[in-house]
Amino acid sequence: MSDAPTETTVKITVDGVEIDARPDDLVIDAAERNGTYIPRFCYHPRMNPVGMCRMCLVEIDAGRGPALQPSCMIPVSEGMSVDTESDATKKAQDGVLEFLLANHPLDCPVCDKGGECPLQDQAYAYGPGESRFVEEKRHFEKPIPISDLVDLDRERCILCDRCTRFADEVAGDPLISFIDRGSQTQVNTFPDEPFASYFSGNTVQICPVGALTAKPYRFKARPWDLDQVESTCTTCSVGCRVVVQASRNEVLRTNGVDVDGVNWSWLCDKGRFDFQSIHSEDRLAEPLIRDGDAQTRTSWSVALTRAASAIRGSLDSTGPSGIGVVGGARLTNEAAYAWTKLAKGVVGTDNVDAQLGDGLPPELVLGLPKATIDETATPGGTIVVVGTDIKEELPVLYLRLRHAVVEDGATLIEIVPHRTGLSGIAAHTLTYGPGGAAAVAASLASDQPSAAGGIDADAIVAAKAAIGGGSVSVVVGRGNVADTPDVIAAAAGALHDGFDARFLSGLRRGNVHGALDAGMSPGLLPGRISLDEGRARFHENWSTVPSDRGLDTTGILQAAADGRLDVLVLLGADPLCDFPDHDLARRALAGARTVISVDTLPNDSTRQADVVLAAAGYAETEGTTTNLEGRVSRLAPKVTPPGTARADWIIAAELTFRLGDDLGLESVTDVFGEMTRVAPLYRWLTMGAIGADGVVVPVAPPEPTPVTIGGAGESEDEGPDSGVEADEDGDADVAADPTPERTAPTPAEAEVDGPAVGAGIRFTAPAVEIPQPDGYRLRLVTTRALYDLGASTQASPSLAKLPHGAVLHLHPHDFDRLGVPAGATVKVSNAEGGRGTITVPVESTEGVPRGAASIAFAQPGGPTNELIDVARPVTDVRVEVAP
Amino acid sequence: MPRLSAENTILAREIIARYPLPKSALIPLLHLAQEQDGHVSDEAMEHIAELVEVTPAEVIGTCSFYEMFKREPVGDYLVNVCTNIACLLVGGEELLHHLEERLDIRPGSTTPDGMFTLEDVECIAACTEAPCLQVNYRYFHRITHDETDQLLEDLRAGRRAHEIPKHGTLTRVRQQIPADRRAGAAVPGECETPVWLRTDEPASEGAAT
Amino acid sequence: MSDGTTPAGEIPLMVTGRFSYDDAHTLERSRATEGYEGLRRALDTGPEAVHSETKAASLLGRGGAGFPAGVKWGFCPPDVWPRYLVVNGDESEPGTYKDRMLMERDPHQLIEGSLICAYATGCAQVFLYVRGEMALAQERIASALNEAYEANLVGRNIMGSDFSCDVILHWGAGAYIVGEETALIESLEGNRGFPRLKPPYFPAAKGLYMQPTIVNNVETLANLPWILRNGADAYTQFGAENSKGTRMFAISGHVKKPGVHEVEFGTTTFRDVIYGRCGGIRGTHSLKAFIPGGASSPWLYEEHLDLPLEKATIDQAGSMLGSGAIVVMDETTDAVKAAWRLVRFFARESCGKCTPCREGTSWLEKVLRRMLDGHGRPEDLGLLLDLSDNISPKIAWPPKQTTICPLGPSAVSPIASAIVRFQDEFRAYCGGGEIPTSVEINGKAYVPPEGAPAGV
Ligand SMILES: Cc1cc2nc3c(=O)[nH]c(=O)nc-3n(C[C@H](O)[C@H](O)[C@H](O)COP(=O)(O)O)c2cc1C
Ligand code: SF4
Ligand code: FES
């Protein structure tokens, strides 16, 4: 947790030394910040104190004489004196420790926690030699699984209430509890009701003993074999800070790091455990090229030459518009910049899109006033969530918003196509009929709300009344890909005009925001500026700049399908799985003359590619990444890529070289330096400014100069033994960043004046025409589930089995009309024809509005993308009982 | 194993309505479940969790804290012998041993015929009437070994059924609150100064809620 | 008098007055004997008057702590609503038998007392928390409440006044710790009976649902009707300087006639009740020790017999009147076994929330049990006392604690009492052993027999 200075301070003495404490400090925190660590087991800085374990007892004198008090429960008060070393304190702490150890199995040699166990450490630091406890110890059945990912050893548990408090207070999943009483107390689940929480791994991280262990890590290594670097999770766009821990070139564990602005030390289980995919035996380890039907391994020079000649051929025959680049959300910022420079600055095509037709217009994401996570979670503020289920798509943002609502009195309004993981704590959940988001938002924003989107007026009036005078932040995402993104865009526009709200993007892919900032979208150049706005400047730095706006992914795929595209480059993109319209994707991959895929794991699309370039992935590359706030933070390499796989930016540089040009980029530091020079967005951005917590761009000019410019050195100082240490509270200290000081701006920097960031990106809400629903059809709504058929999940053995599978959800009214028992299977097909049919089980739920048919995207057993035709604004389906 | 019956569910809703917050009804509802089945089944706990809007894990967390709730079936008659200090001094242990012998079971277990469960319990607030025991929480004060034998006798023969209901039924009289007399639950956040404390305005109808 | 009645003596029976009637639990009998007259008077005089009347009577809490009720009521922060009254009828302290009697024999008196308190303090709802194992008390209170609702004595616009208040009968389910007021509140919220930390969770400020909450013992509230009927002046005619009115004591164990007696508070001595009311030690036996105020209180001895049953005096002597539970032990009593049995109680009843109590009390119990089973070791004496010191530092009185609530330290009193007074009995079980000088024992009542060396 950062040490933001507070204006007023309280003076207290700790062991005779006077210190300044914050008015709201607890004694245990004030003492620690001033260098006195009071031992503790139950206290955790991100949860409410309970004062149960009694390990933090110290003598406190608040005026009425010294008395033993739990320092985790007592707020500081002026003139208070604290004695952490008195005989009484020591005796009490030793006593508590002896009590904790009395029934403890002391099986440290075979315990995962051995070597990093606070109980073990305390025992060495304070405890007497051999135990005075000669009685029979308490016995429980050895480790029992409490979920698919977590085991519990009740004999080791010290009943600190951390896991149970986390489950209840933080995750909102009170599925584990204390059971029985007194010395027989245990932590457990209800019989046959596992601790099925998306956040269960956090309990392992905060367990102060080895009671809770993670199956993916059990017996894998001992702490002293691990070394670690601090990095950023790129599983989704929240960008949680993590430590990546590895041994013998294998990543074995990731833990959350406590960053005030982002994840508060928490991680979701997907982000925590999908590191397993790094070492999947399926990883692409060297380039492949197609001859005939087969793909065969080849050398980089052969593969790159083949790729280059395809591009050159297209340039000669068709010109730049014959080439399209799809994807980029997997890349680092530096790789995204390099690939943008290759595509737009060398090849000269503007057919570049980091999104896969399942996102939002970049003008919306970049052009609307932005809110950070902290601003969105402002105590007492209003949060409006539009179009997305944040618990499924951005899990740790869900924790932050949940905390804002449950603990800090924020008001939550949802405008969503189906009930979500947040609906339980939302003041109002407006579940609109497919296509209805815009109408509902417009009605909400108007002076006399009226019925809209299938929601009656009263509900909207009530929601409007709940929107307080305070700040209004809108989290806007696209959970449903079965209707046009314009409905969400129009909704955002209405809320912007109606409440002058600020916006937090709900786009979920790892570095999609970094890719957009790097210009990986039609009409954009690096640094949130439009083609026209930036053309002049980029001509000075690049060989060329696209003459006019190009195609987005849908356009590119359409062109490919129509035979108008020579080269389709897939940057970590799998359109066959992720693009909403499978039929179009299939025709596109067949229609493109050459498909070049740059990826880490094989997927349906790479298997169709003519050239496959094996890329280094997470924990293998250095650089930076950008989260949904626009926060740039560091990525650190910990292990070497498999085979000859190499970093995406290097692949771009080498491909350019074979095209007879030169990106002029020799190192990640080069790329970073050029970005900060040419893109106004990144001006003043330095490795120093990024620091341990990351920094939201644009960065305010540091005054006074001198300025620190990120220079050589990051790569070294993030080496295997970087100074990062994460304890079980997720606190981490990062080695200070030795970036060289540069006193004066370079000429290049001096040039970086010109239009304000994003000034050229104007968001104008589109008008949407939604056809009237036809009573006999149902309208498709797709949802996202945290665990799906995505590559990283499927390549992680501990997660691969977790997707629930596709189930069609209907409103009870429609369900009854269908007249089948719950669980029966039905055939779902596009009512307009021309698309496929899927057969899935059906369930009834109040969670979806009448007339809607809701089904999760990319789940086993239901290729939902077979049903969608992106040419239509909504997807009407016919549902029949399967024979 | 059953959930709460239809009529017990109605009763449960009535009980919940008496409290400012539903979870406060948890213990009364667990008693209701035990009255219905003689013990608290997993299914009943799940049903109660739905009724008071918590998770089953929270219900078992509370349920398992309290000795009176049995999550496994026990005998029709739960015989609790106090052996705490006052009883210990005047024959509590001897009484317990006598019952162990007569029933041929150890404390904490149930006779094969499912008739009796014997327990060695803490003070039951009859200290001046020691030695003493309870059968399904009905007291027997200053009881001799012969009287104890007679009591077992009668219970086996069903002669005490009128005064001692089967295990689970605690009280045979329920509190009834007539709708027209009900002051109403005082819900946090929905109450202002009670009318009878207001000095300014004249007393108005209704409760402080 | 095992039925608890007292021969009409020089002092009025303020809470057990109706016990001589078999139908004292009915509304009819209650009404015929001034039942609800106190409430009527309260409604006539107004809330402030009732509060000051209670303060003037200096009615001390009867649940154990002996805190003045009127003062406690004043701790509720002004203008925070709703407030609640929780009636503590969880009586489970070993040796204690009075609240059950008050609830079974005269439930209307308790209901009336509760309503008087709720009226004075502005409580919008009363929860009558009755110990789970007391089936008859629950039936009697349920019937009484049903009668009282019908008669408009509880509920909406009580007796036609603007005072409206529901009284909800709530049962426990078997957990001694729930008698502790903050655990009682947790239990009433439907949770495990875990005590809350004080500070910050003093019920008067942050109680039930974090609202201001008054917790009073059954006997405490049962005094209010008499006080309201006869006035504070009449009440303070009886009792000693700092302990007014009457008080119920249960005298059990090795006496000829165990029984519950309502006696004048603060003037009656232990000798009066043990030798007077209860006829002295059984048979030809002699007094060894007695527990003056429930299992948690340090033991007293022959030399304490002439102390008056008065709060301050007994506190002074290093023990407490606690819950009015006097348990008498004659010379046949095995001090080690008695101590073990009391410690087993606390070990079994520990809620498990805090470490020293959860692990410490069960450890102490295991050591004592091992000694009784013939496996005592000379070092056990020192071990018992050092573990005790880790639960209750300096083995002082009033006790200090490393625990959250006083339950843990309660297990220390019987051990310290027995070891100090009856060292030889312990040595016999331990094959010798000494009290190590490293442990301090400061409780004033932890005294060796006259003449004998303290050994500490
Ligand atoms: C471990 C423990 C058990 C207690 N048990 C009871 C009890 O059974 N009944 C009771 O009235 N008070 C009990 N108390 C005291 C209560 O906490 C509280 O002080 C009392 O109910 C206040 O009522 P009073 O002021 O009228 O005495 C207990 C306290 C402790 C620490
Ligand atoms: S499992 Fe760990 S965190 Fe949970 S109570 Fe036990 S020791 Fe504490
Ligand atoms: S000790 Fe047995 S009833 Fe109290």
Image: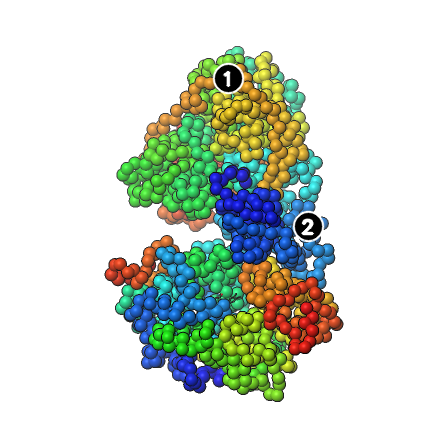
Residue A20, by quadrant, is: top right
In the image, C178 versus A784, the foreground residue is C178
Amino acid type at mark 2: Ala
Amino acid type at mark 1: Ala
Question: Is residue C440 among the parts visible in the rendering?
Answer: yes
Task: Write down the residue under mark 1.
Answer: A750
In the image, A577 versus B32, the foreground residue is B32
Instruction: Give the x, y percent position of residue A287.
Output: 63, 24
Q: Chain of mark 1?
A: A
In the image, A738 versus A88, the foreground residue is A88
Residue farthest toward the bottom in the current orientation of the protein: C284
Q: Which mark is residue A125?
A: 2
Instruction: Give the x, y percent position of residue B114.
Output: 55, 73
Residue found at x 46% / y 29%: A357
Q: Chain of mark 2?
A: A
Q: Could you say whether the residue bearing mark 1 is in a helix, strand or loop?
A: helix
